[in-house]
Image: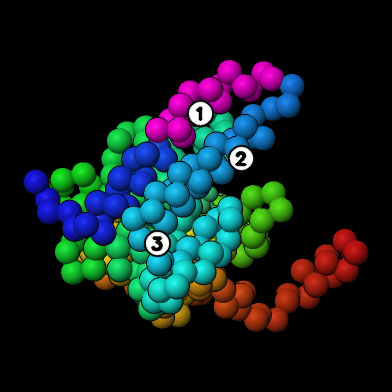
Amino acid sequence: MAFRSPLINVMASAATKAARGLKRDFGEVENLQVSKKGPSDFVSVADQKAEDVLYAELARVRPDFGFLMEERGIVEGSDKSHRWIIDPLDGTTNFLHGLPHFAISIGCERDGEVIAGVVYNPITDEMYWAEKGAGAYCNDRRLRVAVRKDLKECVIATGIPFHGRGDHMRFLKELGLVMREVAGVRRFGSAALDLAFVAAGRFDGFWETGLQSWDIAAGIILVREAGGFVTDVRGAKKVLEAPEIIAGNEIVHEKLRRLVERAGLGPKRVKPRKDAAEGEKEAE
Ligand code: IPD
Ligand code: CA
Ligand code: CA
């Protein structure tokens, strides 16, 4: 049995408690698809209830720590070095549509660095956890990132911007560059689980733009403790508040980072062909 520190134990136990309510509510969601009000209010209540449980549990066992939570925002603690970073339900759209792929994500930050993380999927009962220097695990199984180096063999996860969110054209450029190089691109709908899957070697890499700290805090340490690399598009390791995140083993991470970077650079400036320029004029 893998040794879990007291810190991991309190995180895992808070996640398990909050997951009970989420699991129950997930079972109700399908019945609500037909109700008048629709399920989205119900889901945001489920989300808040899960956050309330996490907040109460973690504040009880570590009363001095601060919090950054998706729903409540910032709660200052008297201990200015430690902070919990919490997403009570990552994969809300999946939850709402009855798709069993969502998670609770808890990161523990010390002086700006994530030192422990837990991502728990209540449906599969998979508890991903990692602590700085102690490795990454799924339940009791030690995790290692995949060893594939050739992009042609790699399955890469991402997040697709949607209605009202993100830079759609930029994403299409990124996808255009990545998809022609790889074995497949996946969009599963939970960034926390995407990173956990990279740590577990299920996905070879992951990139996404526009995520928040609570989506990725726990996932960052999972990947790093599983031997992987996590940076922004320029290769900076301080990624918690960066506009984008890229993860994978050392080689895949760098290949993916370069592709995503190229997309951000915009199209090469080429002189338009005469007929193309005329066509554009006509279209105006
Ligand atoms: C979302 C998920 C999704 C990502 C979105 C996030 P939420 O979190 O992580 O995979 O693509 O951008 O907002 O809203 O389900 O907590
Ligand atoms: Ca989220
Ligand atoms: Ca959420």
Q: Which residue is mark 3?
A: 63
On screen, residue 206 above or below 120: below
- The residue stretch that appears in magenta: 20-35
* Residue at x 36% of width, y 46% of height: 14
Give the Cα separation between the discs numbered 1 and 3.
Answer: 29 Å
Q: Is residue 20 above or below residue 53?
A: above
Q: Residues within 10 Å of mark 2 (few under 14, many from 20)?
A: some
Mark 3 element type: loop
User: Above or below — where is 79 with respect to 43?
Assistant: below
Identify the residue shown where x is 48% and y is 23%: 27
Q: Is residue 170 magenta?
A: no
The secondary structure making up most of the magenta span is helix
Q: Is there CB contact under 8 Å for labels 3 and 2? A: no
Which dot, 3 or 2, sits closer to the camera?
3
Q: Which residue is mark 1?
A: 25
Indicate how the structure is coloured in the image. rainbow
Quarter occupied by residue 219? bottom left
Image quarter of residue 32: top right
Q: Which residue is mark 2?
A: 44
Residue 22 is one of the magenta-drawn residues: yes
Q: Nearer the viewer, residue 250 or 99?
A: 99
Residue 214 in the image, given as x and y percentages of width and height: 48, 59
Q: Amino acid at mark 2?
A: Ser
